[in-house]
Structure formats: structure tokens, C-alpha cells
Amino acid sequence: QVQLVESGGGLVQAGGSLSVSCTVSGRTFSGYTMGWFRQAPGKERECVAVINWRGSTKYYADSVKGRFTISRDNAKNTVYLQMNSLRPEDTAVYYCASNTKWAISPTTYGYWGQGTQVTVSS
């Protein structure tokens, strides 16, 4: 059974930093595109960052470009999201997800973690 488990997150003041990670178990990790998504109350789930299986191609939403960094360690079956210069509008539940193809739309991702809350206070 494939499992994605996020960790990290929490409460931070605006301008601060947080890191979240996602560890995959139950299948080979290295061949899959991994994405980070977020969903704020009353809003649709949106893509934050995506990384291809080799880590050579990355996508960032405009809203996080220059502040967030996605990375992965295939030996540890883990994908990371480093979040710097956090803003109150970054407050959301953050999810990791895996895909057999490169994709930005969350609807194409088949496996999801349970989510971790990130709250940025002003």
C-alpha cells in the first residue's frame, strides 16, 4: 500500500521560515513526479511546487517563486519544501502528492498525503 506522510509545518510569524517533508512508502519513489499543493479555507487546492523524478526540473507557482524551494532525496524516498519569507497568505494545509507524469493540475495526482497545517501570523 502506497503511503505519503507529511511532517513539519506549524505556526510561524510573517517573514519566518518553515520546512515540510513528505516520505513515501510502499513503492518505488524515484520514478515519480512529486508535487506540493496547498488548500486554504474556502479556496481550491492549488499547486505550489513540482519536481520531476530526477530533481532536474522544477515548477513554482508565481506566488511562491523566489521564496520556496522544492527538493527530493530519492535514497530517502522523501521530498522537501523549504519555505522562506512566509506571508499570512501562505496559511493553508499543505499536501504532497505523486504522479507518474509531469503535471501541475492536482486532479492528475493519484496518491496524496494527509496534509500538514502551516499557519503564518501577521
Image: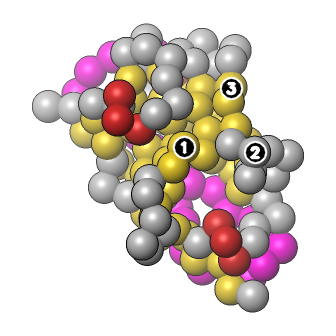
Work out whether residue 27 or residue 83 is closer to the camera in this orientation and state it.
Answer: 83
Disc 1 packing (10 Å; few <14; some 14–19; many ≥20): many
Residue 47's disc number: 1
Which amino acid type is shown beneath numbered disc 2?
Asp
Instruction: Report if residue 10 lies within the magenta region.
Output: yes
Mark 3 vs mark 1, CA separation in Å: 12 Å
Which amino acid type is shown beneath numbered disc 1?
Cys
Q: Earlier in the sequence, mark 1 or mark 2?
A: 1
Give the extent of the magenta segment.
7-30
Question: What's the residue at 38%, 23% (across, down)?
Answer: 99
Q: Earlier in the sequence, mark 3 or mark 1?
A: 1
Q: Residue 119 sits in which quadrant?
A: bottom right
Q: SS class of the residue under badge 2?
A: loop
The answer to whether one can see residue 12 in this image is no
Residue 59 in the image: x percent, y percent? 67, 30
Which amino acid type is shown beneath numbered disc 3?
Lys
Disc 3 packing (10 Å; few <14; some 14–19; many ≥20): some
Work out whether residue 91 or residue 118 is closer to the camera in this orientation and state it.
Answer: 91
Residue 48 in the image: x percent, y percent? 60, 46
Instruction: Report if residue 80 lies within the magenta region.
Output: no
Q: SS class of the residue under badge 3?
A: strand
Which residue matches tag 2?
A: 62
Q: SS class of the residue under badge 1?
A: strand
Which residue matches tag 3?
A: 58
Above or below residue 120? Residue 73 is above
